[in-house]
Image (cartoon, rainbow, N blue to C red):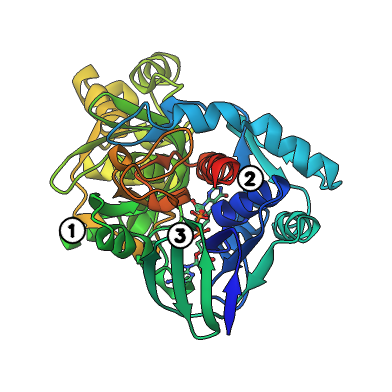
Amino acid sequence: MQHKSDVIVIGAGAAGMMAAIRAGKRGRSVVVIDHAKAPGEKIRISGGGRCNFTNIHAEPKNFLSANPHFCKSALARFTPADFIAMVDRHGIAWHEKALGQLFCDDSAKDIIRMLLDEMRAVGAGLHLGTEISGVDRREAGFRVSTGEGVFEASSLIVATGGKSIPKMGATGFAYRLAEQFGLAVLETRPGLVPLTLDPGLLETVAPLAGISAPAEIRHGKTAFREALLFTHRGLSGPAILQISSYWREGDEIVVAVEPDVEISAHLKTAKQLNGRQSAQTALGDILPKRLAQFLVERERIAGNMADLPDKALQRLAASAQNWIVKPSGSEGYRTAEVTLGGIDTAALDSRSMETKTVPGLYFVGECVDVTGWLGGYNFQWAWASGFAAGEYA
Ligand SMILES: Cc1cc2nc3c(=O)[nH]c(=O)nc-3n(C[C@H](O)[C@H](O)[C@H](O)COP(=O)(O)OP(=O)(O)OC[C@H]3O[C@@H](n4cnc5c(N)ncnc54)[C@H](O)[C@@H]3O)c2cc1C
């Protein structure tokens, strides 16, 4: 079967659906092709099923890229307020959690339904369960060969995401296609991912698995203050996921639990006020009890506070607030929320996401070398870059 349209979008995820909506609103005939059985699968599982669909503080500084300026134009032309307006138009209730993160009150499925309704309203076609066997450039555009026939269009928007969660159908398709068309692809790596510890260290922290505490995690000049979670594989929680996007194999990170409390000062005061209590009890006033016990045992500190030299208390405080850790690795694409790196932004026009060397070919969303922090930033990039391509395709 032969399908002809103005625009083909490959990938019915966040970026692809937004691109289709925008192109359709401009009167372009659009088809969206996806090999998955359902659209927006990552939207469905995102934000614990409630989809952290944007962040009201989204700014270019919240994104990692070899060219930190690249994302500015698209982010400025489709803002969190623009997406909120769409959500409101569809009567979807939402709330703000900490740090400007917006979630659906009810279900992430509301966002998928909204995008599908918008696509339907502009007459965009959707072909699910459609395997792509090849993409060729034709004189007047592109030809996409699939199990459901051949699709032809003058513009092709590639929105197939990154490599994270291969179980959900992530394929690396966009990178291979970019290479087919001679575009540079920067090294990809898992981002927003738990970090693992070597077996020796893991054994010592094993008793802490399941414990969570507010923390500041530092890597060089970058620091995030969010929750830290000890797991049976290593370290996780939002603060670790955030720093993981900056961390490289062999690097150290610095962990400070309860960063808003000066633990050394607290211990000193505790010693003055009640010298008969143990350091574990004093530390347990601030930290989860099991963590306090772990730190005291690790520093081999025993006895009443009154009998402990200030140096010992300082050592204990440093072990809680200046813990230098060398993770052995990350959990990889199996659990990573995003893929860092990808299609080199130098190959793309930042206003339209169109490739500079292949007119009519666009790349949007996660496959591009723009990666957001945790907290709704990645969807905002997907919406904004999809919108930008849909505006020009
Ligand atoms: C568990 C989890 C939770 C997350 N939670 C959040 C959150 O709350 N907030 C946030 O901002 N970000 C979150 N993210 C990140 C966010 O999901 C992604 O950044 C975003 O989905 C990227 O959008 P995209 O359209 O570029 O790619 P995707 O949403 O991955 O869509 C790509 C589409 O392309 C299709 N595809 C892939 N390969 C092919 C192929 N060869 N042929 C045809 N179709 C193909 C896929 O089936 C898919 O439908 C989360 C990610 C994960 C894994």
Amino acid on which disc 2 is placed: Phe
Q: Are marks 2 and 3 in contact (CB under 8 Å)?
A: no
Q: CA distance from mark 2 to mark 3?
A: 36 Å
Q: Is mark 2 within 8 Å of ligand 1?
A: yes
106 on left or right of 347: right
Q: Nearer the viewer, mark 3 or mark 1?
A: 3
Q: Earlier in the sequence, mark 3 or mark 1?
A: 3
Amino acid on which disc 1 is placed: Asp
The spot of residue 198 in percent (x, y) is 18, 58
Amino acid on which disc 3 is placed: Ala
The residue that disc 3 covers is: 140
Q: Is residue 158 above or below residue 99?
A: below
Give the class, few, some or many, for how many residues have Cα within 10 Å of label 2's Cα (few <14, many ≥20). Answer: many
150 on left or right of 63: right
Q: Nearer the viewer, mark 2 or mark 3?
A: 3
Q: Earlier in the sequence, mark 2 or mark 1?
A: 2
Q: Is residue 322 above or below residue 229?
A: above
The spot of residue 249 in percent (x, y) is 16, 49
Q: Is mark 3 within 8 Å of ligand 1?
A: no
The residue that disc 2 covers is: 53
The residue that disc 1 covers is: 198
The residue lying toward the viewer, choosing from 366 and 236, is 366
Q: Quadrant of residue 376?
A: top right
Q: Secondary structure at mark 1?
A: loop
